[in-house]
Amino acid sequence: NVHWKRSTSAHPHMMLGYPVDSNLKRYVSESYAAMDEILARVSESGTELPSLPPDLPYDQDDNRAKYIFDVADSGKAFRIRIAFVASGFNSKAVLYLSQDMFRFFNPDEFEVHIFSLGPPDNHAFIHHTMRGVDWRERVKSNVDVFHDVQHLKNDHIALARYIHSQDIHILIEWDGYARQGERAQGLFALRPAPVQILHQEFLGSSGAPYVDYIVTDEVTSPEKLESLYAEKFIYMPWHFFSKGHAMQKEVKLPTYEYAPASVPYKLGTGSPQENRCLAPNDLGPNDVSFVYCNFNKFLKNNPETLRSWINILRSVPDSILCLLENPTEGVPYLRNSVKEASVGYDDAEDLNARIHFLPWQANPFDHQMRAQDFCNVMLDSHPYNGHTTAQDSLYGGVPIVTRSDGDDMSSRVSTSANIILEMSDLNAVDGVSQYVEIATKLGTDSKYYSSKRTKLIDSCLQQNPLHPYWDVPRYTRNFETGLKHAWEQYLSGKPKQHIYVKEGDETKKGTYESDIARLEDARRHAKAKRRKKNTQGEEL
């Protein structure tokens, strides 16, 4: 029989949205980390627990001497083999944000592998919905080796053996506890690589002793809060999120002026006030003064957040709130919550007439464009910020008001972003009351609002060099630096320490248009050269 020794009732990913003590969230992650590999091994009946093979998990220290020799023997020719493992190497948010990194890895220093656990997108979806854009194929064209290992997704032991056989030096987790049922449960516990890193998708501690580092920044995860994490930090300069908006030609640049409105609505036309969140003409104010938005899943929004939005609507006459039907089934419950929050005010009918919902838009580029069309300001969720939706909004010229009084990693993403974008006055450091005050000021002080919108659009349009917040080649250089430090710490055999990535002089210059072509050409030529060398070796 199987005897459980830890609680597994709460899931770490769902916990990100709960307004509970941050230490409890770490405890839940620790509990899950302790059970993760065991749960992957339990029989389908749930009654048997086969033993692990005696050579697993792999010993992190086994090959250290070999690697030290390899580095010394190869000199400058040594390349660190890094690998990203995820279920979402298709049209998922993490790839939308991060695929462009693969265009800019230094081919002389890094050999880049992908271990993809999920299937490619349906051809009809690529052709019709994505209009021919296939992120998976883009990644394939930019990495050294793409391993389609979806057949091993439910066999973490075989997957660990396969990854270990590729002699990967640094394994990077792009699922964390997200995508339950799709991710490679139990894989990282078997230590298939000597250095293992959590990056991007799950924004919280893994709670796992077998995850060495988490990629973050000093605002999102200040060192004073290190007790909330099992990992050491790789501190990125600027912002820890990779975001490819400025690199993808399909993503529309924001504009200072709105295009003339069209009836019926067409993408890329009209101001938020004119488009009114596509509300019926007989519902809500006809002459809308200001449009607040939140395009996150409903699970990110708790009663306190909803009450704060209601207070904002009350403070800004003729304003409306534009939300996303995500999911559609949640709309009646949200409207009922508005009624409950209106007891004593007798304004539930008026409030619900000022809250409207947009349908889901499957094409990510069209979804991003809607931010400029429908939103004056984005009201962030707390304690689980908007992440991909936040980047979409910012690149649409839509300022974000966020609470900055939380300790959770997932609650501080927009706080860090606003500081980098020089809009720290939109960070409500004093909590929910200040959050309402800031949002109200933006909705009632047109000069103040215009200054924020203009500054944000300036950052998006900045060229030669790109603004640091949107500069993917610069981000990749800094990410590489963090990986090199992590590898050096491993080779040293000393206890892990936090890594503070410092930009070199060349990186500090930022990225110019000519740099992008040069970096992409260098990677293509290096791949072609190695392919030719491998072919010649096979012929011999």
Image (spheres, rainbow, N blue to C red):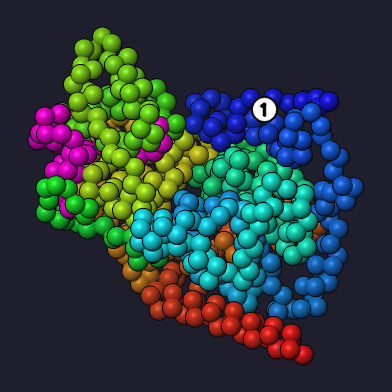
Q: Give residue 395's position: percent from left, percent from top.
A: 33, 54
Q: Give the quadrant of residue 47.
A: top right
Is residue 448 something one can see in this rendering? no
Q: Give residue 103's position: percent from left, percent from top.
A: 50, 70
Q: Residue at x 17, y 43 (%)?
A: 275
Tell me: 84 left or right of 495: left
In the figure, 451 relative to 466: above or below? above
Counting labels gives 1
- Which residue is more in the foreground, 13 or 534? 534
Tell me: 119 left or right of 260: right
- Which residue is more in the foreground, 142 or 481? 142
- Which residue is more in the foreground, 128 or 24? 128
Is 303 in the magenta? no
Q: Secondary structure at mark 1?
A: loop
Q: Give the quadrant of residue 128.
A: bottom left
Name, please, the residue furthest toward the top.
Answer: 344
In the figure, 479 relative to 201: above or below? below
Name, please, the residue furthest toward the right.
Answer: 54
Instruction: Give the magenta part as a residue range.
Output: 269-298
Name, please, the residue furthest toward the front.
Answer: 124
Amino acid beneath label 1: Thr
Q: Label 1, on which residue?
A: 8
Is residue 252 something one can see in this rendering? yes
